[in-house]
Image (spheres, helix red, strand yellow):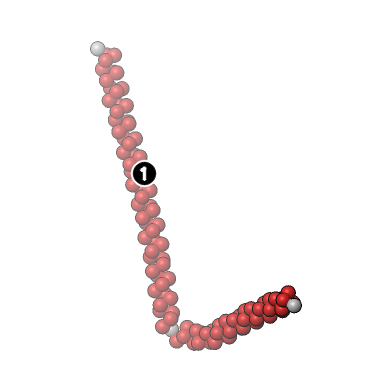
Amino acid sequence: MLKQTLTDQIKNATKQRDSEEIQVQKKKTQAGKAEGELADANASIKANTEYSNAQHARDDPKYQKEIQIKRPEKILLLRDVFLHNMETIFISISEYLAHFAQRGT
């Protein structure tokens, strides 16, 4: 009788322990998901703040002046790159035509 009572108590305690372990695992999973959602939310807030700050900076006259100064410099740089690329293409075409002319004669 005493042995049966102790055996039943052990079984019940084991079931309860297993049930509690399952609950702990579920809570850990929920906590992990919540931490991930929190990290996503913080990243979104940071991105929105940076975007908002950038928008406000664009309205600043000082920023507008910097853009006006940098824009012509950038255009000149792009023009120089374009001209260099065109020169390289023309040289390649000239070399190809010269080679083709030598082969033909």
Res 87 quadrant in image: bottom right
Q: What residue is pinned by disc 1?
A: 28
Residue 93 vertical placement versus 29 (above, below): below
Q: Nearer the viewer, residue 42 or 73?
A: 73
Task: Answer left or right for 80 relative to 47.
Answer: right
Q: Nearer the viewer, residue 86 or 93?
A: 93
Task: Answer left or right for 71 relative to 80.
Answer: left
Question: Number of callouts in the render?
Answer: 1
Task: Answer left or right for 98 relative to 4.
Answer: right
Task: Answer left or right for 93 relative to 56.
Answer: right
Under circle 1, the secondary element is helix
Residue 31 vertical placement versus 68 (above, below): above
**Residue 90 appears in the figure:** yes
Mark 1: give few (<14), some (14-19) or many (20+) Cα within 10 Å.
Answer: few
Name which residue lies at 33% across and 41% down. 26
Specify the quadrant that holds the N terminus: top left
Q: Amino acid at mark 1?
A: Lys
Q: Residue furthest front?
A: 105
Residue 22: percent from left, percent from top: 32, 36
Q: Nearer the viewer, residue 2 or 87?
A: 87
Name which residue lies at 37% across and 60% down. 41
Residue 96 vertical placement versus 6 (above, below): below
**Residue 84 appears in the figure:** no
Residue 53: percent from left, percent from top: 42, 75
Specify the quadrant that holds the C terminus: bottom right
Residue 15: percent from left, percent from top: 29, 28
Q: Nearer the viewer, residue 79 or 60?
A: 79
